[in-house]
Image (cartoon, helix red, strand yellow):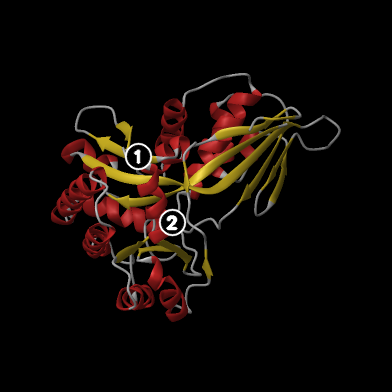
Amino acid sequence: MIISRTPYRLSFFGGGTDYNSWYETNGGLVLAVGLAHYCYITVRELPPFFEHKHRIVYSKMEHVQNINEIDHPSVRACLEYKNILKGLEVHYDGDLPARSGIGSSSSFTVGLLNSLACFKGEEFSKIELAKQAIHIEQNKLSEYVGVQDQIMAANGGFQEINLNKNEPWKISKMNLSNDYLKELESYILFGFSGISRLADKHAKRKIENIDNKKTDQQLHRILDITKEARNLFAKNDDFKKIGMLLNKSWIEKKSLASGVSNDYIDEIYDVAISNGAFGGKLMGAGGGGFFFFIAPPKHHKKIKKSLSKIKVWVPFKIDHEGTQIIFRNGQNEI
């Protein structure tokens, strides 16, 4: 039995500039962190005692003879990609809900690829696992995704993702002091709106608008804001300045496609700002999912009390490890 643990992600700045159709022409930059909340994928060989060859367990349970009969698109694509011949059981558990703007689909894909590699006795770097996941999601499944989710799921940490024209993407760890990171964690409020959504339709609209050059100005402004935020983080600067930049970025993000925000979402955001938050955003492609806000800790209680529409507040902590094998054939790995 193999168990992988893979973080979800929180994107501070630069979302939207990581779509290939944008950064391959204009360049892109993303600042993001891995979340210390995880996707767990268990893989084990399924003995030939059953009528089925493969068992896949997530929000539903599948029993199939052939890989091409698997409904779950990522499981089907990953098993085909890894040329799995033996019968397998694949089991998913997650700390946070799917379809909530935290990159859960890519965390699933990266985690499954990691578990399958371990199952086959293969070793890949975190960069290579991210590249494999990008290939599967973009080319095998034709999903409307960028590249930040897979990179962050594989690597974790606080990363600067540079997306240069005509060059492979590169990541570098942000040089922040431990004290600064701990203070940053204390400033962030992370709450679930209670709305799960399919990211695909919102991401599709964004990509269509990029292809039609309808959002060039907004994405250029988001890129400029992200560069400014990178400089502030690099100086371990004041969180009020960073929060105000986040507010500017959210205004631009809302205009990238219809449906990113709505009256319900706008009301949550406005109430948080009026009760002391410096800035924030709805995570992911939009339409629902998790909010995060940067606010002085002294205002957290007031903000939470004012936001009854936030169903659950989740402790925020940064993951620094990325995807890991935590259990292998009877042995704990961490």
Is 66 left, or right, of 296 in this rendering?
Answer: right
Residue at (52, 48) in percent of width and height:
36
Residue type, numbered disc 2:
Gly
Are the residues at dot 2 and dot 1 in contact (C-beta closer than 8 Å)?
no
Residue type, numbered disc 1:
Gln
Q: Position of residue 230 (x, y in %)?
A: 23, 45
**Residue situated furthest right in the rendering:** 49
Q: Which residue is mark 1?
A: 159
Disc on the earlier residue, 2 or 1: 2
Residue at (43, 56) in percent of width and height:
101
Does residue 144 appear in this view? Answer: no
Placement of the C terminus among the 4 image quadrants: top right
301 vs 63, nearest the viewer: 301
User: Can you say whether 136 is above or below 17 in the image?
Assistant: above
Q: Which residue is mark 2?
A: 101
307 vs 205, nearest the viewer: 307
Q: Position of residue 273 (x, y in %)?
A: 31, 74
Tag 2: Cα neighbours inside 10 Å, few (<14), some, or many (≥20)? many
Could you tell me how far apart the alpha carbons at marks 2 and 1 are, in whole angstroms?
A: 18 Å
Question: Mark 2 falls on what kind of element?
Answer: loop
Question: Mark 1 falls on what kind of element?
Answer: strand
